[in-house]
Amino acid sequence: MNTILILMDSMRRDHLGCYSLSRPDTPNIDRFSNTATVFERSYIGSYPCMPARHDLWTGQLNFLRRGWSPLEYDQPDLVTLLSQSGVRTSLITDHYHYWQYGSGNYFQSFNSVDLVRGQEKDNFKTGNNDKVEFPAKAEKLNPDWHRYYMNIKDNKSEDDYFTARVFNSSMRWLEENHDQGDFFMMIDCFDPHEPFDPPLEYARKFLPEGWEELIKWPCYGNADRFSKHDLEIIHGLYCGEISFLDHCFGKFYRKLEQLNLLDDTTIILTADHGLLFGEHNWIGKHSRILFNDICTTPLIIYNKSLGSGRNSSLVQMSDIMPTILDIMGVEKPDGIQGKSLAPIWDQKLRNNEDILHRDAILFGVFGGAVYCTDGDYVFIKKPNETNSPLYWYTRSHFNNWDFGQINYWRDSIKRIEQFDGRRFPVQYKNAHPRHAAPEFSDEKSKYASGVDSCDELYDTANDYAQTHNLVSEKPEKTRYFKNIMKRLMVEFDAPAEQFERLGL
C-alpha cells in the first residue's frame, strides 16, 4: 500500500467546489473528490503553519506545550517511523519554513527530499534593490516584496512557478519510484499562501473590471485600509492561485491514473488553515480570534476501501499521523493524541475510543485562547489578564523563530539560564499571541495589560460568520464546554499552569 499526502498552506475550504463555493474554478480537485470522501467537520489543531506540521508529524497537539518550533529529538515522528519500517519516503516542497532556524528539522528523515527554493521571504537570491519592479503601489505591498522579487524575477514560463515546479518534481519521482515497493510521498505546497502570484491567465476571470495594479502581497491587518476594488483584486489573485494549483494537481492526478496507482494508493488532500479577505475587517491570518474561515480545513481522502461520499466525523491535523501508520501497517507509538480515521472504513480497528466516538476537539495557538468545538458550537476560553503563567516545554531547542534567517543566540542563552530541564518561561510583548513565537519573559510587569479575557461562544451551525457571542445567553452550554475542555486537557496531559492561565 502507498500513501500520498498533499498539504496546501492557507487553502480556505470554501474555495473548493466540493465545499460548495461556485466562484473559484477547481474542476480537477472536484473530480478527485467525486471518487473520495469529503470530511465536512475538519479543523486545525495547532496554529499556524509549522505548529500544524508538528501535529501532523507527531500525532499530538503542539500548542499546549510550545509554539513554532522544530521537532523534539526525544519524540517519535511519522516520517522516522515509516522510514525505519522500510517504507520509501519522499518530500517535495517549496515550503521554505522547513529549512529555517527555529523550525528546520522536519525533512531530515525522508529518504529523498526536493526543496524548491524561493517562496515568500526565503533567503535564496539577492540583487540590486533599485531595480525591483512593483506590481502595485509600494505602500499596498509587504515591505519584503523586494526579497520575493529577487527570487522570481527570472521566471519565464508557467513551469517556473513554484506550484508547477513542486508537482512536476512529484511526477518525476513517481515515474522513477512507483514500482520500487511501498512508498509515502508528501507534497507540501506553500501556495495558495501569499504572495498571491499565479500566472496571470489563471487570475483574470477573478479580477474586477478596471484593475490597473496587482496587490500580490498585502500585509496582514485591518481590511478597511483598502478600497473595495483593492480587496477584490487581492481576493481575485488568491482565487487565481487556487485555480493554478488545481491545474497542476490535475496533471499530477492524471499521472497517477497513467501509472495505475489508484488501486493501491491512499491519497490525502488537506490544508493547515485558511485566510480572511475582508471578513471581520481583516486581511490574512492572525485575526482577533481564529474565525471559521481560518480554523476549518479541507480534508479529502481517497482509499479504495473507503469509497466516495461525505463524512461528518470530527477530525483535525493530529489524526493524520495515526491514520497513515494504520494504512501502511506500521505500529503506532504510545502517547498519540490524534485518532486514526482508518476505523471509518476498517471495522477491525473499531473500539469504544475510536474516531467514531469522538464528541469534541481542541485547537488553538500557543499562549492564546483555547478553542473547543463539537462541530456545531465553538467555545473560546480566553487567558487571564496577565496571560500567565506560560512556559515553553522542550528538551531539544531554545532558539526563537522569526522567519528563520537569524540565530537569536542571546535569547537562547537567556532561555537556557531559565531552563529547569523541561521548560522555560515565555510571554508576548503585547499580550496578544500572533504566530506562536513568543519572546523570552524576563520583566513580567510589561506583560500585565492588554489581554482580551472575555470568553466567547458561537452557534456556528447557524451563525457561521460568528457575529453573535452567546456566552452570557447560554450559561449551561458554556459550562458544558468548559467541562469538556478540562476533560480533554487532562486527557492530553496539558501542563498544570495552562489550567491556571485559562481560569479552569
Image: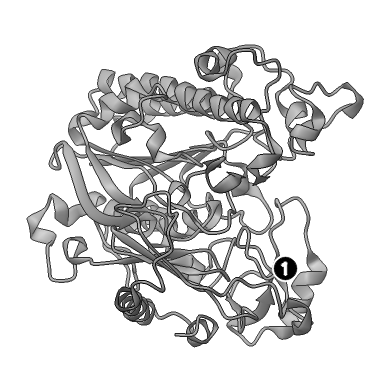
Q: Indicate the quadrant containing the C terminus: top left, top right, bottom left or bottom right.
A: bottom left
**Residue type pointed to by label 1:** Asn
Image coords of residue 39 (percent x, y):
26, 45
Q: Answer left or right for 280 relative to 251.
A: right
Q: Answer left or right for 85 relative to 205.
A: left
Q: Indicate the quadrant containing the N terminus: top left, top right, bottom left or bottom right.
A: top left
Q: Residue furthest front?
A: 473
Q: How is the image coloured?
A: one colour
Q: Which residue is mark 1?
A: 430
Nearer to the camera, 80 or 442:
442
Question: Taking the image as drawn, is residue 142 in sight?
Answer: yes
Question: Taking the image as drawn, is residue 326 in sight?
Answer: no
Nearer to the camera, 26 or 292:
292
Q: Is the residue 174 above or below the residue 500 in the image?
A: above
Image coords of residue 38 (percent x, y):
25, 40
For the image shown, how many numbered marks are present on the structure?
Answer: 1
Which quadrant of the figure has residue 408? bottom right
Residue depicted at x 55% and y 77%: 383
Q: Is the residue 385 above or below the residue 83 in the image?
A: below
Image coords of residue 277 (percent x, y):
55, 38
Nearer to the camera, 207 or 3:
207
Neighbor class of circle 1 (other Cα within 10 Å; few <14, some 14-19, many 20+) is few
Which quadrant of the figure has residue 374? bottom left
Residue depicted at x 58% and y 65%: 67
Residue depicted at x 61% and y 25%: 233
Q: Is the residue 337 above or below the residue 416 in the image?
A: above
Dot 1 lies on which element?
Answer: loop
Image coords of residue 333 (percent x, y):
32, 68
Residue depicted at x 65% and y 81%: 386
Q: Is the residue 462 above or below the residue 259 in the image?
A: below
